[in-house]
Amino acid sequence: MSTFQNIKGTFDILPDPYTDDGDTRVAASAEWRFVEATVREVLERHNFDEIRTPVLEPTELVARGVGEATDIVQKEMFAFERSGTQYVLRPEVTAPVMRSFLQHHLDQRGGVQKLYYVGPCFRAEQPQKGRYRQFHQFGVEVIGTDDARADAETIASMMAIYEALGIPETRLRLNTLGTPERREEYVAALRDYLQTYEDELSDTSRRRLERNPLRVLDTKLEHEQNILQGAPQLIDFVGDDSLAHYDRVKGLLADLGVDYEEDPFLVRGLDYYTETTFELESAALGAQSALAGGGRYDRLAEVLGSDAPVPAVGFAAGMERLFLVLDAAGTERPRVPRPDVFIAALGEAAERWVFRTTQALRDAGLHVAHDLKGRSLKAQMKEANRQAAPYTLIIGDNELEAEAATVKEMASGEQTEVPFADLVEHLTAQVDAEGAA
Ligand code: AMP
């Protein structure tokens, strides 16, 4: 009988790295911890507090919060019903964070809420390199201010993560969406323009033209990009207040030394997206080039039922794509944590002593490995090597009788006789000294 396989578009994170069916390297769990710790460290340094929301949310929250017209809601939700309640596995975290903000009146904590998250998201997309059905996002939401500094700080925090991880040559694209009202005027103008080229558009773009013309701007087809060269640009429709906000954001980014390129065709179609929008790309990613994206969403709270407007800005980034660029950049990886000490046992009495002593050493804070299988001494020493423990002990009847063990430092081969009574102290001192070196 064959055993089970993980669901297509998901993957296991194992103690060691491996290559999956899609020929993609899946990083080891220690690498995930390292990258997540870096994300947390950088964001906490930027004064963000962590928020954790459920993976399950009401379907209606996502339908409204992400937008009925989006691909996500139209075809990518993992949604189901149970006893009359509609559930969805969250496809993103912005709507859930805003739900939580409104539900718990987080504004009453005072000031601006700067929140970050790290966790899994789910979209029923066609799996391919850099595109999964269960993937992981980290991101921030700055809620409760329309100050341009919040936009610039959001972008700078995002850039600081990639910088901390040593990722070179990312490309930050920036645009302003203005207000939904002005954007409507633009959409009408864009539709008029594109309709004159309708015969030359692909089926996909023709469908988009009908439902959501802004999405035609995402085309990757060269002849359509050429048509777009002459299209009206959103920036020409944006109001003076929005332009002033955009100028402030650009000025602040310049103050912080953050490089960006303005891209008049970078847009998001949803009504609650407002003002600043941005996307971070890496050439190392190929087709799925987006590392992260974000912007202002000053109208989302109202879409979710808030009586008062709640201005907010944020970014969302993909972990899997971050690993792809880390691989391309050859960034140094943390190893699987190795034990400080491996203790081999020879004989039944020794096994019992080792079992007890292992626990005592662990209680003292050491990372200790031993055999749980009753293997030969040779096999145990092989295991000690595989686990790369810097110190090993071999305990047999002689050691039990002498109440002393020989501690072998594997790198130098140096051996030290240590009375059992001094073992915890001796090993702790050795490991501390090594850690300090
Ligand atoms: P989005 O919410 O679509 O703007 O996604 C934000 C980021 O999440 C993207 O820039 C990607 O890095 C990542 N991402 C989105 N969808 C997927 C997916 N299906 N698989 C892996 N990463 C994804």
Image (cartoon, rainbow, N blue to C red):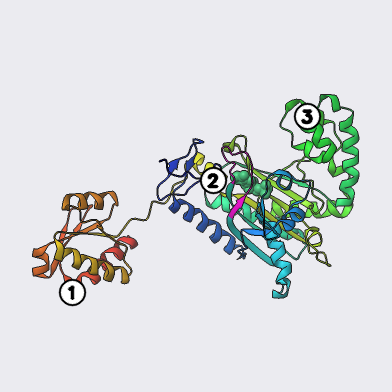
Does label 1 or label 2 sit earlier along the sequence? 2
Comparing labels 1 and 2, the label whose residue is closer to the camera: 2
Say if the magenta span includes residue 123.
yes
Q: Which mark is residue 401?
A: none
For mark 2, give the secondary structure: loop
Which residue does the numbered mark 3 point to in the structure image?
A: 203
Q: Which mark is residue 421?
A: 1
For mark 1, give the secondary structure: helix
Which residue does the numbered mark 2 point to in the structure image?
A: 10
The reply, left or right, for residue 397 in relation to residue 325 is left
Residue 71 in picture, x, y percent from top left: 72, 43
Circle 3 residues within 10 Å: few <14, some 14–19, many ≥20? few
Circle 2 residues within 10 Å: few <14, some 14–19, many ≥20? some
Q: Which quadrant of the rendered structure holds the C terminus?
A: bottom left
Identify which amino acid the numbered label 1 is placed on.
Answer: Ala
Does label 2 or label 3 sit earlier along the sequence? 2
Mark pair 1, 2: CA separation: 50 Å
The reply, left or right, for residue 49 in relation to residue 145 is left
Does label 1 or label 3 sit earlier along the sequence? 3
Identify which amino acid the numbered label 2 is placed on.
Answer: Thr
Circle 1 residues within 10 Å: few <14, some 14–19, many ≥20? few
Question: Does the closest atom of ligand 1 sit within 8 Å of the Cβ of label 2?
Answer: no
> Pointers 2 and 3 in contact (CB under 8 A)?
no
Say if the magenta span includes residue 405.
no
Comparing labels 1 and 3, the label whose residue is closer to the camera: 3
Q: Which residues are magenta?
A: 120-133
Mark pair 2, 3: CA separation: 30 Å
Mark pair 1, 3: CA separation: 79 Å
